[in-house]
Image: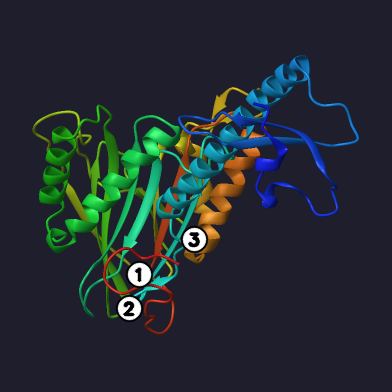
Amino acid sequence: RWIDPASAPARMVPEDFGEVGSMVVTPLPGHGVPAGALVLLRRSDRTSFNDSEEVFARLFAARAGAAMSAARLYAEQASITEILMRELLPPRLHHVDGVEFAAGYRPSADEERIGGDFYDVHPASAEGQESLAVLGDVCGKGLEAAVLTGKIRNTLHALLPMAEDHERVLRLLNGALLDSHHTRFVTLVLASAVRRSGTVRLRLTSAGHPAPLIVRADGRVEEADTKGMLVGALPRIEARTHTTDLAPGESCLLFTDGITEARGGPMGDELFGEDRLRAALEECAGMPAEAIVERVRMLVSEWLGIGRHDDMAVVAITAPRGAHLSAVGGHGRGRFTA
């Protein structure tokens, strides 16, 4: 409203403005609380504000206030999302207790950066004990799937003391998901790895997830004999654990179905498929874990072209050639992050 210029605080008048002849102050409406105030001044040598100018000022203030409030709300939401994404983004992997790990991740929408596929590597708490790698695929895409992904990762982290028994871990995780308000389910594979002399002992357990593929030194690709039920859908689940040894230079690949179900190729609608994945892995015999991951990612990306795709994640576990290697860049016991 119009205000007596004589009653205006000095801080509202710019320096060297001169004598104020008329003033209009109108609020900038926001979401629940005002976003600020619009102050209009005229010098005493100018015509005073009239009624139509006051109406125009109010209309302008309403639009400006809404825009400012929306921008402020967006900035707050963006900050919260960034904090959440830093926690949900997959970790970078290195060598852990003599075992070589590498991983790759690509969400269904590149701008989202996060999705329903996830992986973690939890280093052993003491030398000679197993490290645990987890690769999973939550039903759905986008932020909602990513939130459930975070819950699953945290639950698995809490269950690390029981990691010697994969089936027990899966049963407890299944109960936790059934007790929550989420209606989604997850498929995952657990891989416990420990270096013994020159080999790496692997225990692999699938829960409704594609079975891991093992790349032998001579180029043979074997499917791990593990099967199980998906987690979070039924009150009771069962799973079978497969144990194998990796000789130096041999690897095991964990992958989500976003890899094998990637559609592309010459006609644009053909599945990449497990046969192509196996053929690619045959050529990767003896390669380091990181090279295997990059090779798989490159082939799938070329197959996709610019087509749409599901979330995709891969984890390679390799028995390295040479000396024993320790954890690099981790934070001790628990989730291995960069």
Q: Is residue 80 shown left or right of residue 167?
A: right
Residue picked out by circle 1: 247
Q: Residues within 10 Å of mark 3 (few under 14, many from 20)?
A: many
What amino acid is found at the position of numbered circle 2 in the picture? Gly
Q: Is residue 176 shown left or right of residue 123?
A: left
Q: Earlier in the sequence, mark 2 or mark 1?
A: 2
Residue picked out by circle 3: 285
Q: Do the residues labelled 2 and 1 touch (CB within 8 Å)?
A: yes
Q: Is residue 306 shown left or right of residue 156?
A: right
Q: Which of 82 and 326 is in front in this view?
A: 82
Q: Which of marks 3 and 2 is nearer the N terminus?
A: 2
Question: Looking at the rendering, in which quadrant would you find the N terminus?
Answer: top right
User: Where residue 39 sits: x, y (%)?
Assistant: 70, 36
Q: Is residue 149 visible?
A: yes
The residue furthest right is 45
The residue furthest top is 52
Rendering quarter of residue 176: top left
Q: What element carries label 1?
A: loop
Q: Is mark 3 on a helix, strand or loop?
A: loop
Q: Nearer the viewer, residue 157 or 62?
A: 62
Q: Residues within 10 Å of mark 2 (few under 14, many from 20)?
A: some
Q: Earlier in the sequence, mark 1 or mark 3?
A: 1
* Residue at image point 16% right, 59% down: 163
Residue picked out by circle 2: 198
Q: How far apart are marks 3 and 2 (CA)?
A: 17 Å
What amino acid is found at the position of numbered circle 3 in the picture? Ala
* Residue at image point 19% right, 38% down: 228
Image: 50 above or below 21: above
Q: What element carries label 2?
A: loop
Image: 325 above or below 205: below
Q: How far apart are marks 1 and 3 (CA)?
A: 12 Å
